[in-house]
Each structure stands twice: as structure tokens, then as C-alpha cells.
């Protein structure tokens, strides 16, 4: 993909928080820099009060890790950082260590476009603790936002019931990075095209668009504006009809459509960007049909999201294509996914020492171990997910225990189909994963969501999909908690 190279043309190794460097330096000073460790990236709650999440951003992670190195400009910057006593923050030997650092971790991840749930590791990284620690912030940055937008787009797609969705969010996105990654994630989640031409080029996403009100306003009248646009682009005529009077705009679009037809061209459609979209789309549909333009599409925009689209469909609005922008790329009403990255195991000699973080809030006590996620399915539907430890021998019958409520348990009998979700991405720092193209990832989202029960997919008070700790891992976690609280 080479997106970061195309945009920045240099090292991104400094894309992390300062405290990652201070911890890395302290590990190095303690002689623990090469100590083997395991970290997991996961989130604690589904966004938008929904029942599922779509994981996205792995392709960015792969590119970032393939290019991971500290160049001289990075080291020069770190060299001039000072502590509170105005002495160098880092010793020169540590900077030499960074200069020679070569990425050598093992990375396993759940592929992009997979339906995932709270507490499941989206990425598991194993390797020298300095490397794993330095990667915390960039990995969260690359996964959190794209997963959030992909999930929003999947919800919009569900609401649109298969109708086309154009992503219009470039002008409202948070900067260039936000616009590009949002366009990519939105397409993966279900949008059919983007207005962002650079995103179309970089990611091979179809681009689409109409014209703005300024085109109409630049002429003496709307009819002339439509005629001139049709003259310039007879093969791309979707007219924005609400600059002055929406229904009059539809009449003008029909008039120009008839002139196009005489030239052997067709009016592709109209776009409505304001007002009562249900009312105006119904009226416009009747007018277009009566004029012989049954194939002309009606595009609607104006701060749409899954809830407004659902309402408009409930009102039987005659809308064929949805233009969704601001509320999609900004992931409106959920500004962040809230993904976290936690240490779960360290190994000094041969034996693993499992770790967890305690908290007075149960949701913030992370799961220990070298984790994998096993998904059980029956008759083409997802049944439950089990988080288990790779070093634990599993029994034939699985007992899943809710990490938030130990009284909630589910037994999975032998013979049920399953697959393990985390796949090898890097081994000893070398890429071993074959990346699917963006269109395959988008199709995967559709297939994954189709396997979810409708009760999990609904927007209001969705049913909770079963995700549990395998009983041995639950027992191990409980023992660690008791030990750390000095209750055992």
C-alpha cells in the first residue's frame, strides 16, 4: 500500500508518546530490554451502544511495522530532549541501541473486516519488551479510529438496507489523516464510493459526486445552470435541486433530462440536500416517473446517520442513494473506540509469568495469558466466542465464563464448528500474512454481519453476544487477582 511513504516520505518511528521512550529507556537501563513479553490490544465496550464492532486498520499496522526503524533525524531529535535538570533525557548508548534496533516481534491479529467484541485481543504482539512497549501508541492510533468508522459505516449500511451509500466526509474530517483513513474504513464498512479523490487513488475505492450549490448560484438562474452542466458533463448528470425551491429544481432537472435524452444521454438522478427528505423524495419520485425518468435515482444527503436513515425508510422515503458525511467520518456521538494495550505475560527464562492490571472497576481488570479467540458457529450463525490461553490444554467440552459476571456461563458441547480468529501476521519480524484487497475486506464485513443474530444487530438495546473466558483462563485470572490483593 505504501500510504505512509506516499504521504510523509520518511520515518514514523517517533509516532508514539514520550512515556513509551522513557519506559523503554528504563527497561534498557535495567538490562531488561530484550526480555520477552506479550501485549494485547483490545477494547472494553462496543461503540454507539451497539452489539458488535468491525476491526479495521491492520493494513496500516503492517506497513508501519515493515518500515519501523529509527533514522538519524529521529535520533537527533531525541538527543536534544532534556530532563528537568536540563541534562539529556537519554544516554548516547541508548540512542545507539535504538539506531540498531530491528523489528523482530511476532504479531498475530484478527483480520480486517471481522466482527469482534469487547475484551477480545485484536492484536497480540510478542517479543522484546522495549519493542512491544514502543509500539503501544501507534498501534492504538492505527486501529482505534478505523475500527470506529468501519463500525459506523456498517451500521449505516444496515440502516440503508442494501441501498447505495456515498461517503461525503472529506471536508468535515479531522485533517488529512482523518479524511483518508475514514474513507478507507467507511468503504470497508459498507459505503459504495467516496467523494475523496485522493482516497480513491490510494485505496482503489470508487469515487462519486454531483455538484455544489455554488455551481447553480454562479448562473443567473437554476435552469441555465443545469443546462450548462449537462453540456459540460452529459454522462454524469445528477442535479442538486434544492438551491432555491426543491420541487421547482426537480422540474428543471426533468426539463434538462429531456434535452439530454434527445442527445442519446440520460439523466442519472437528482440530489436533495435539505428540507423534509421523506416528503420531497416522494414528490420527486412521482414527478420523475410521470415524466418518463423511472430509472433516475434520488440521492439524499444532509447530516445523515443510521438513525435518520432508519427513520426515513420507516416513512417510506423514495431514496435510492444516501450521501453520508459528517456523522460518519467523525463517528458522531462516539468520539473514540477506547481501545487499550495491556501487558499480559513476561518471560525471563523458560517459564511465562502471567500479568494483569487490577482495578476497582471490573471492566478495567485485563485478562492475562497468551490469548487466542475461538469462534463457535452453528448452521451458519455465530454462537459464542471463547478467549483462551495458548499454553492451556483445552477439554473437549468448553465452558465460557463472562469476564464481567462469573455467574453467567455457557457450555459448548463437542462437535460444534469453530475457528480461531487471530492469524499470524509477522514471525520474527518478517511478514507472513497475505493481505486481501480492500474489496475482499468489504465483502468479508457483509458475510460476517450476516452470521450475527438479528437481535445482536439491532440499534436499540441490542442483545449481548456471548463472549467468555475459557474456564481454565478464568481460574488463572481469579488466582492472580487473589494473589495481588493478598487474599491468598
Image (cartoon, rainbow, N blue to C red):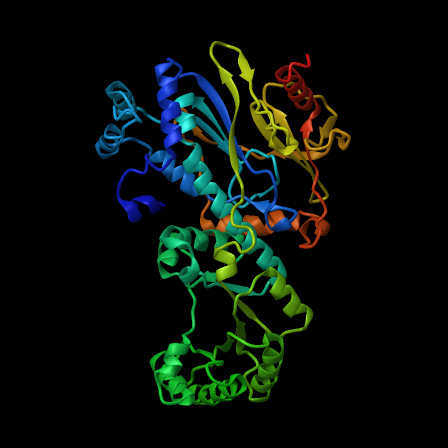
Query: As drawn, is 290 to the left or to the right of 200?
Result: right
Residue 183 located left or right of residue 86: right
The answer, for residue 206, to whether it is visible in the render is no
Say if 142 sits above or below 125 in the image.
below
Query: Is residue 157 visible to the viewer in this orientation of the structure?
Result: yes
Q: Where is residue 19 in the image (x, y as percent from the top left)?
A: 39, 29
Q: Which residue is drawn at 36% across and 45% down?
A: 1
**Residue 224 x/y as whole percent:** 38, 89
List x then y, in percent, for residue 292. Answer: 56, 87
Q: Determine the residue located farthest toward the top in the rendered image.
A: 349
Against 14, residue 27 (above or below) is above
Counting labels gives 0
Q: Residue at x 61, y 41 (%)?
A: 45
Query: Who's the residue at 39% across and 87% down the image?
Result: 227
Looking at this view, is 402 or 288 the one in front?
402
Quadrant, the C terminus:
top right
Rendering coords of residue 438 (x, y %) = 46, 50
Residue at left 50%, top 85%? 245
| Camera-nearest residue between 383 and 404 | 404
Amino acid at each position: 500500500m505504501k500510504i505512509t511513504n506516499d504521504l510523509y516520505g520518511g520515518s514514523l518511528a517517533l509516532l508514539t508518546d514520550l512515556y513509551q521512550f522513557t519506559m523503554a529507556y528504563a527497561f534498557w537501563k535495567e538490562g531488561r530490554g530484550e526480555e520477552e513479553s506479550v501485549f494485547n490490544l483490545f477494547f472494553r465496550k462496543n461503540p454507539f451502544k451497539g452489539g458488535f464492532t468491525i476491526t479495521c486498520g491492520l493494513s496500516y499496522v503492517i506497513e508501519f511495522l515493515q518500515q519501523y526503524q529509527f533514522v538519524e533525524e529521529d535520533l537527533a531529535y531525541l538527543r536534544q530532549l532534556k530532563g528537568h535538570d536540563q541534562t539529556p533525557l537519554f544516554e548516547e548508548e541508548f540512542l545507539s541501541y535504538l539506531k540498531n534496533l530491528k523489528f523482530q516481534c511476532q504479531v498475530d491479529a484478527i483480520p480486517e473486516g471481522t466482527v469482534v467484541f469487547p475484551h477480545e485481543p485484536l492484536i497480540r504482539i510478542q517479543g522484546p519488551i522495549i519493542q512491544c512497549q514502543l509500539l503501544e501508541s501507534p498501534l492504538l492510533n492505527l486501529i482505534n479510529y478505523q475500527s470506529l468508522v468501519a463500525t459506523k459505516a456498517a451500521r449505516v449500511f444496515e440502516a440503508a438496507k442494501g441501498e447505495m451509500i456515498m461517503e461525503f466526509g472529506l471536508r468535515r474530517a479531522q485533517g488529512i489523516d482523518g479524511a483518508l483513513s475514514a474513507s478507507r474504513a467507511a468503504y470497508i464498512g459498507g459505503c459504495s464510493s467516496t467523494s475523496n479523490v485522493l482516497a480513491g487513488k490510494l485505496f482503489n475505492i470508487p469515487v462519486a459526486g454531483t455538484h455544489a450549490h455554488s455551481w447553480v448560484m454562479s448562473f443567473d438562474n437554476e435552469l441555465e445552470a443545469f443546462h450548462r452542466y449537462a453540456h459540460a458533463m452529459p454522462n454524469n448528470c445528477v442535479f442538486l435541486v434544492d438551491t432555491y425551491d426543491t420541487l421547482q429544481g426537480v422540474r428543471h432537472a426533468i426539463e434538462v433530462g429531456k434535452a439530454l435524452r434527445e442527445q442519446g444521454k440520460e439523466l442519472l438522478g437528482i440530489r436533495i440536500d435539505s428540507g423534509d427528505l421523506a416528503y420531497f423524495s416522494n414528490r420527486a419520485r412521482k414527478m420523475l416517473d410521470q415524466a418518463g425518468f423511472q430509472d433516475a435515482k434520488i440521492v439524499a444527503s444532509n447530516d445523515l446517520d443510521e438513525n435518520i436513515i432508519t427513520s426515513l425508510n420507516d416513512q417510506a422515503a423514495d431514496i435510492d442513494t444516501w450521501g453520508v458525511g459528517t456523522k460518519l467520518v467523525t463517528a458522531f456521538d462516539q468520539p473514540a473506540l477506547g481501545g487499550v494495550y495491556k501487558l499480559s505475560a513476561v518471560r525471563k527464562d523458560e517459564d511465562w509469568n502471567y500479568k494483569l492490571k487490577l482495578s476497582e472497576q471490573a471492566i478495567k481488570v485485563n485478562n492475562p495469558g497468551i490469548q487466542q479467540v475461538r469462534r463457535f458457529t452453528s448452521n451458519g450463525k455465530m454462537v459464542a466466542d471463547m478467549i483462551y490461553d495458548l499454553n492451556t490444554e483445552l477439554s473437549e467440552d468448553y465452558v465460557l465464563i463472562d469476564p464481567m459476571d462469573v455467574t453467567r456461563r455457557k457450555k459448548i458441547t463437542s462437535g460444534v464448528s469453530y475457528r480461531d480468529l487471530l492469524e499470524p501476521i509477522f514471525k520474527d519480524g518478517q511478514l507472513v500474512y497475505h493481505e486481501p484487497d480492500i474489496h475482499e475486506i468489504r465483502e468479508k464485513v457483509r458475510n460476517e454481519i450476516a452470521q450475527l443474530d438479528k437481535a445482536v444487530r439491532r440499534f436499540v438495546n441490542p442483545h449481548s453476544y456471548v463472549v467468555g473466558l475459557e474456564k481454565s483462563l478464568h481460574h488463572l485470572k481469579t488466582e492472580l487477582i487473589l494473589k495481588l490483593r493478598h487474599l491468598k
